[in-house]
Image (cartoon, coloured by chain):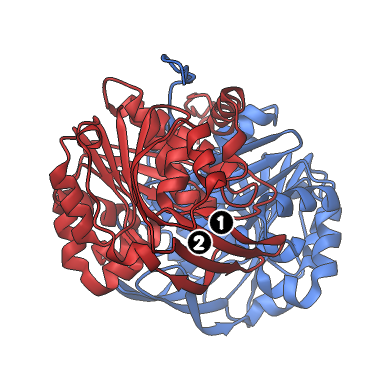
Chain colours: A red, B blue
Amino acid sequence: MSLTVVGSVAFDALETPFGKRDKILGGAATHFSLSAGYFTDVNAVGVVGNDFGEDEWAVFERHNINTDDIQVVEDGETFFWSGRYEYDMNVAHTLDTQLNVFETFDPQLSENSKNTRLLFLANIVPMLQKGVREQSNAEFVAMDTMNFWIDSMKDAVIDTMKVVDCIIINDAEARQLADEPNIHKAARKLMETGGLKAVVIKQGEYGAALFTENSFFALPAYPLESVFDPTGAGDTFAGGFMGYLASHDKIDEDTMRRAMVYGTVMSSFNVEEFGTERVDRLTHEEINQRFSDFKRFTHFEEILFERATSA
Amino acid sequence: MSLTVVGSVAFDALETPFGKRDKILGGAATHFSLSAGYFTDVNAVGVVGNDFGEDEWAVFERHNINTDDIQVVEDGETFFWSGRYEYDMNVAHTLDTQLNVFETFDPQLSENSKNTRLLFLANIVPMLQKGVREQSNAEFVAMDTMNFWIDSMKDAVIDTMKVVDCIIINDAEARQLADEPNIHKAARKLMETGGLKAVVIKQGEYGAALFTENSFFALPAYPLESVFDPTGAGDTFAGGFMGYLASHDKIDEDTMRRAMVYGTVMSSFNVEEFGTERVDRLTHEEINQRFSDFKRFTHFEEILFERATSA
């Protein structure tokens, strides 16, 4: 077991311009696990209610995700989120949020989950993230967060950032957390404040960027002509990124760059159908095909200009 | 002579959070020419008033720009634009626009300007762009446009698009012109409608993308920690792109990709100081250094994932 994720397991109700689903499997830990499961063995830590049924468990089983640390609250209901996307998909309108059993979620890591080499703290209350980090013996820990926590408890987010190695957030969150509109300055400031090894900035349709101590790497998004449902894209990205890292003995710059590509590839599949539908039935061939596509999309020869005639 | 540009030559008054300038050299044809001048010989076609002085002409002369086709209206004043940028620099607030001699601009190409291999139609009234294209014998013609023309005379913009080879516009303009929110669909639609060989989408701080018949290429922006003045960045990009192409006998996919990198490099210098100040005093070494930087920023090894253990 090499990767543990702690986060929400949920039911989602979604409306996009292309259709709707009333109650499908969702949640950050779900999207992350399914994605990471293509690269490594994953332990999911979360909580669900008694409405979490055989079909839902079967998705985790199919991908060999260890669910021993998903608590089941027998008299409770699973976290429920309902949202609607506009035609341009950049903004989700939350229609309903029912925290249910997630409201009192107190993540406890089994010995197994404590001892994975990598740990991902999906978007939950920053104090809980910190508590989980303290339970874990992981060598490399990454966290997500969201505008809600940055607005209401920025100091706690920063406290947690100080005990992890990597933060994986979107560009608006990075600007807000660093209080700095320039994304490069924001990333450097977060790296310094948090003592981080890496800052990963997700830029949605514009791709993603990786900041490490001495380097900058950026990648466009996969050129999709239709985005069906962006829910879970960020967690699917993080799953591909962390899952790929977990499958390697050494987390160096080159490995992180390829992890960025695999993260981007996984999120590109996620948005092609509702919820987990597309990622649930991927093949390694499909995944590697898109990895190779990215080489084509970004390649240019390093031939420097020399002016032939005198200026 | 291998490249002609038609567009505005202007005075700008600028306010950014980092300072202000009351009356500096600006205009699309100016920014384009200075940038392209690092790669090829350039003819600028435009119009100025009698307030256009020695200092302004000297900038063109320093870069060996042919200004024979810049008309001087003896009793007129040069186009003047005044704008203010917010802290995040993504939106320019126009404070004042005085078209002056530009209002009746009727571009006439000399034999010399008619016979350059490449032509760039900077952002002017689409009917004038079309008229210039019809005067020219260029093999490869690119155009820019803006939201104002797309709002008020979209059909004319499309008519012009049909007689050029390439369109270089920002992402909001591409979406608006194609009436399609997905940028990949929008680019394909423009390519088809216009019978274009290439669509270049400028994405500001997120970089730029190139669509050709069978290919997609994308590049991040240069990672700048301070953007001083974004005025002219798009024209400086186009100047680097077209100037690099003009310096090559063959305009193929590989050449266009390197042209995208040089365009991005040139625009990254442009925004570092006010107006033309930075691009006015570049060296080829500085330009090539950033080209090489881009190779580092975007490079990853194509090593495909193979799962070692059974899933």
Q: From the top left corner, tell me how far across and down residue A198 is, in percent.
A: 26, 41
Q: Chain of mark 2?
A: B
Q: Are marks 1 and 2 in contact (CB under 8 Å)?
A: yes
Can residue B262 be seen here? The reply is no
Quarter of the N terminus of chain B within the rendering: top right
Viewer-proximal residue among A51 and B129 = A51
Q: From the top left corner, tell me how far across and down residue B111 is, in percent.
A: 79, 48
* Residue type at the position of mark 2: Gly
- Left or right: A26 in relation to A245: right
| Alpha carbon separation for disc pair 1 and 2 | 5 Å
Q: Which residue is mark 2?
A: B232
Q: Which residue is mark 1?
A: B235
Q: From the top left corner, tell me how far across and down residue A19 is, in percent.
A: 71, 61
- How many neighbours does mark 2 have within 10 angstroms: few (below 14), some (14-19), or many (20 or more)? many
> Residue drawn 65% across and 78% down?
B101
* Residue type at the position of mark 1: Asp
> Residue drawn 54% across and 68% down?
A82
Q: From the top left corner, tell me how far across and down residue A266 is, in percent.
A: 52, 38
Instruction: Determine if marks 1 and 2 fall on one subunit.
Output: yes
- Left or right: B167 in relation to A212: right
Can residue B10 be seen here? The reply is yes
Q: Secondary structure at mark 1?
A: helix
- How many neighbours does mark 1 have within 10 angstroms: few (below 14), some (14-19), or many (20 or more)? many
Viewer-proximal residue among B81 and B104 = B81
| Label tally | 2
